[in-house]
Amino acid sequence: MQQTPNRKYTAFAPVGLVDRDWPNRVIDKAPIWMSTDLRDGNQALFEPMNAEKKMRMFKTLCAIGFKEIEIAFPSASETEFGFVRSLIEGGHIPEDVRIEVLTQAREHLIRRTMESLKGARQAIVHVYNATSKTFRDNVFGMSKAEVVKMAVDAVKLIKTLADEMEKLAGTQITLEYSPELFTATELDFAKEVCDAVTAAWGATPQRKVILNLPTTVEIATPNIYADQIEWMHKNLARRDSVLISLHPHNDRGTAVAAAELGLMAGADRVEGCLFGNGERTGNVDLVTLALNMHTQGIDPQLDFSDINAVARTYEHCTQLPIHPRHPYVGDLVFTAFSGSHQDAIKKGFAAQKADEPWTVPYLPIDPADVGRSYDSVIRVNSQSGKGGIAYLMETEHGIVMPRRLQVEFSGVVQQHTDTHGGEVTADDIWRLFSSTYFESTVPVRYRDHHLYEHGDAQCIRLSVDLDGTPRILTGEGNGPINAAVHALQSAGIGVQVRSYEERSMVPIGEDGNAQACAFMEVAGADGGDRYGVGIDSNIVTASLKALISGINRAGIAVAARCVAEAA
């Protein structure tokens, strides 16, 4: 990398706006949205969308709620021209949607563009020419006066043709003008061109002109763009007859911030693409921008309640993947691998009430708002902790683990992830849980039991295998568990129960049937305690299974003499 960038690059000059208001403003309503997915987004694709994909994307954009959609550059090719005609002639445009088409400020291109709109009820004609000093001097060799004349001549032609179309077919044409590379254009000259355009069109409050002020290439920080927008907002002639539109690109990675600050600075409208598609690093991401508003209590007037369907349509039509960490949409954005994060999320879900403001930690939006389930919120890898594991065990398998069991089992999962690497799924965790707590039969394997009473005592007849040898053990106590402990002790198994809990499992599945789950903490042979777990439709059976599971996990051996006696 160049070690002395100051010799090659110059800092963008700040705007001399001493009375800026935008830092003290907030966004309190949705802007006018314009999707350019079918134009700016499409022209940036390695393989542009065919007619079928463009139609699918158009209908998706309409379903989301876009009322203005830039559909094509009709003078660029017969394909683009034909798509405009197919929408109009096929009656595919909803009555409350305005299509938009783009043209350069050249007569033959304008005429071809207007021809594509014949029969449309309403449309926006978007015309542009380059205004920045670099383009004036180095690309086109034009003076400022020539640039202004080019824009005005184009607008006058569009107005003449639009008036004819209105008389002949009632078509309502709205003008949009873009000074290309606005952010690199001197502000006073940008105002001069824009004022000349609105005058040539005869803009009125009833027939407003859209002035699109793009970051054609993002070359400054978002605050400078906001200053530029506010300066234009305060200084444009016929401001009441103008809609200021933003068209941020993402060359510096700050398009969303630029759009948000631009709206605070006085803009009325935003152009962009779903998921940030577009030239180079893309246009501003309208999904992120809209959902940012949603999380601040503002209705964005766009429907992303089934974000997965929108995402799959986008990926199909563009052949571009959505990054797994894309805000609000990526496959991993509603996940947590960190143990402390998982624990906080789990507790946040438990505390969250349906009629109260959203306060779940680490989740700026309720996944349900975008049609995502809570199933994917907690993910487990080597960085995960007990909270996430406990959440998955409860939501996926109905087992609400005691806290100390959470700690114990998280160590089992941690060992697995350290050894094998990567993520473990809910099914992987269940297999680990089953192999740890259910599948061991050494030294004791449960077969069945029979309970009976002897005076005031509870008695048990316990059928087990001890180190593979069938045994019938009997014992009595003040309850079934105590009786089973005495029966096992009679066989030389020195088990000590530290704690016992029993719970109904959370019903999982359509039948809604709940089984009993018992948790038994027993003293281990190494001085540590171990949990055993048992599941059964009968709570006593579940408890006995938990006791034997704990014995097997605690490493308690069968006394050699007892095995010998059995022989």
Image (spheres, rainbow, N blue to C red):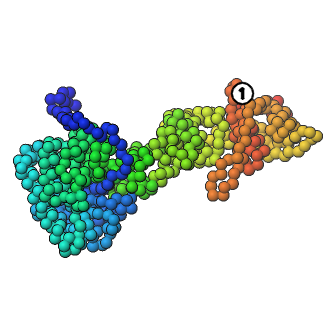
Q: Secondary structure at mark 1?
A: loop
In-front residue for pair 55/133: 133
Q: Which amino acid type corresponds to the residue marked 1 in the rendered image?
A: Ala
At 19% from the left and 48% from the top, the residue drawn is: 236
- Quadrant location of residue 50? bottom left
Q: Where 250 sits versus 408, above or below?
A: below
* Left or right of 169 on screen, residue 405: right
State the image coordinates of residue 291 (x, y, percent, origin top left): 40, 48
Residue under label 1: 525
Residue lying at the far top in this picture: please name it: 527
At 55% from the left and 40% from the top, the residue drawn is: 348
At 23% from the left and 46% from the top, the residue drawn is: 233
> The N terminus lies in which quarter of the figure?
top left
* Left or right of 109 on screen, residue 20: right
Can the viewer see residue 300 in this picture? yes
State the image coordinates of residue 481 (x, y, percent, origin top left): 80, 38
State the image coordinates of residue 400 (x, y, percent, origin top left): 65, 42
